[in-house]
Image (cartoon, grey):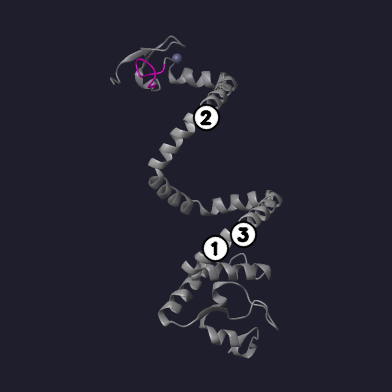
Amino acid sequence: MNYLAVKTCTSCDTDKAVALFSKDARAKAGLTSRCKACDKEYRITNAEAISAKQKIYYAENLEAISAKQKIYNAKNAVAKAAYNKIYNAENSEAISAKKKIYNEKNSEAIAAYNKIHYAENADAICAKNGAYKKANPGKANSLEAKRRAAKLERTPVWSDAKEISLIYQQSASLQKLFGRAMNVDHVVPLQGDLVSGLHAPHNLQIMFAPDNLYKSNKFDIEGFNA
Ligand SMILES: [Zn+2]
């Protein structure tokens, strides 16, 4: 395209540089007949009519559009997954804040949906969970501990979920390495006889399973202070 060329806008009837016109593959010259400024004005003035027209177009071409979308998605699946991963990592706080608000607003509907969904898919869900636990013992144990701590309201807001999950994953790795059962233990038990500990990294320790079982919920204050 010759960017020094000039074109007359059909709306304002002014000769303008071609760079001031949008591209339009369907148009003869490859450019819109209205200049960008006029086009913007046109879109604002006719916003309602344009959106009504679009709605009709989508309704009439639903199948063709979704078929095209499917092909596009399949072609770009890998790139999209990579993009999503980066986007989610960069916006994790904003995303989880948004999710939290959404879940709070829709808690009743979500609970109702979950109830039906679990009832209808109980076997499949159990099988999937079992397979996940087997493949990711550290993460599964971390989630289980998180649920238990939440039930007891022992997870402080400052608790680092990622760090906690890493401790559980480390425990699973050690278990594999030693060939002996390992547990992640709360130094001060979540539900102790005297005091209750927190579900937070500083209160977690990786132990061989029998020691941990023996420890139970007894908390030795003198030992802890020493
Ligand atoms: Zn114009």
Residue identifier under label 2: 62
Residue identifier under label 3: 122
Q: Give the image location of residue 118, x and y in percent.
A: 64, 57
Query: Crowding near pointer 1: few (<14 within 10 Å), some, many (20+)?
Result: few
Distance in Å between CA atoms under marks 2 and 3: 34 Å
Distance in Å between CA atoms under marks 1 and 3: 9 Å
User: Magenta region: which residues?
Assistant: 24-32
Q: Determine whether the residue tagged by mark 2 lies in a helix, strand or loop.
A: helix
Q: Amino acid at mark 3?
A: Ala
Q: Give the image location of residue 181, x and y in percent.
A: 49, 81
Residue drawn at 40 percent across, 50 percent down: 82
Q: Nearer the viewer, mark 2 or mark 3?
A: 3
Residue 224 in view, yes or no: no
Residue farthest toward the top in the current orientation of the protein? 13
Residue 210 in view, yes or no: yes
Closer to the chain start, of discs 2 and 3, is 2
Query: Crowding near pointer 2: few (<14 within 10 Å), some, many (20+)?
Result: few
Is 62 positioned to the left or the right of 31 in the image? right
Closer to the chain start, of discs 2 and 1, is 2
Q: Main secondary structure of the magenta part?
A: loop
Residue drawn at 37 percent across, 22 percent down: 25
Residue drawn at 59 percent across, 22 percent down: 52
Residue identifier under label 1: 127
Query: Crowding near pointer 3: few (<14 within 10 Å), some, many (20+)?
Result: few
219 is higher (above) or lower (below) than 6: below
Residue farthest toward the left in the current orientation of the protein? 2
Q: Determine whether the residue tagged by mark 3 lies in a helix, strand or loop.
A: helix
68 is higher (above) or lower (below) than 151: above
Q: Amino acid at mark 2?
A: Leu
